[in-house]
Image: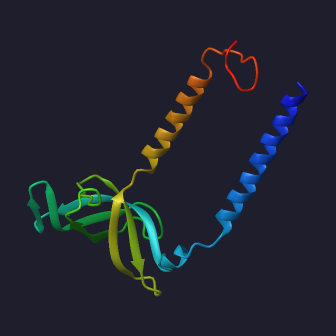
Amino acid sequence: MRTFFRSRKRDLLLVGVFAVLSAALLALPTGFEDRIQKHAVRCRGRVVDTENAHIQQFGMVKQGEQTVILEILDGPFKGRILEGLNPLMGQMDRDKVFRKGDIALVVLSVTPDGDIRYVNPQSHYRLGTELFLLILFALLLLAFGAGPVSRPCCLFCFQP
């Protein structure tokens, strides 16, 4: 029993060391902080209409430009209808083709005066879906963990 508590203290000490190291790594600057535009607004936008006349399809690959009409759903420009360009580069893993009714993550490049310079629909907005999947995963993990319990004879084996 005494060795159990001694190993438990070592485990807690190791967890503490890794927590401190993780916090230190989180605080270190990476150099990517300067890549974010100072005058950019990230928001959600509903696709009102699309213009696909400049898209060329070569087999399964699409290239060209898609014009997207967006209604901004949040942020300082909420309610405005804006037109953005969605460049398709022929890379199926990176290109996103929008349809009417889609919710998009939109980055608005704004001048220091507050005027919108460029509207960039970057990707489909999936935060709600990702949150649902995270909660589902946590519930399934709890259900799996609450299954039949077999008591181990010691800390390192699971034979009763």
Closest to the observer, 150 or 118 = 150
**What is the x, y in percent for residue 70?**
30, 64
**Which residue is at a point 38% across and 65% down the rendered structure image?**
106
Total marks shown come to 0
| Quadrant housing residue 83 | bottom left
- The colour style of the image is rainbow
**What is the x, y in percent for residue 98?**
25, 57
Left or right: residue 80 compared with residue 89: right
**What is the x, y in percent for residue 8?**
82, 35
Compared with 147, 99 (above or below) is below
Q: Residue furthest bottom?
A: 113
Left or right: residue 87 compared with residue 57: right
Left or right: residue 8 compared with residue 95: right
| Quadrant housing residue 114 | bottom left
Compared with 14, 93 (above or below) is below
| Rendered-image quadrant of the C terminus | top right
**What is the x, y in percent for residue 107?**
40, 69
**Which residue is at a point 16% across and 66% down the rendered structure image?**
63
**Which residue is at a point 76% across and 21% down the rendered structure image?**
154
Q: Residue furthest top?
A: 160
**Which residue is at a point 40% across and 82% down the rendered structure image?**
115
Left or right: residue 105 compared with residue 83: right
Compared with 112, 152 (above or below) is above
| Rendered-image quadrant of the N terminus | top right
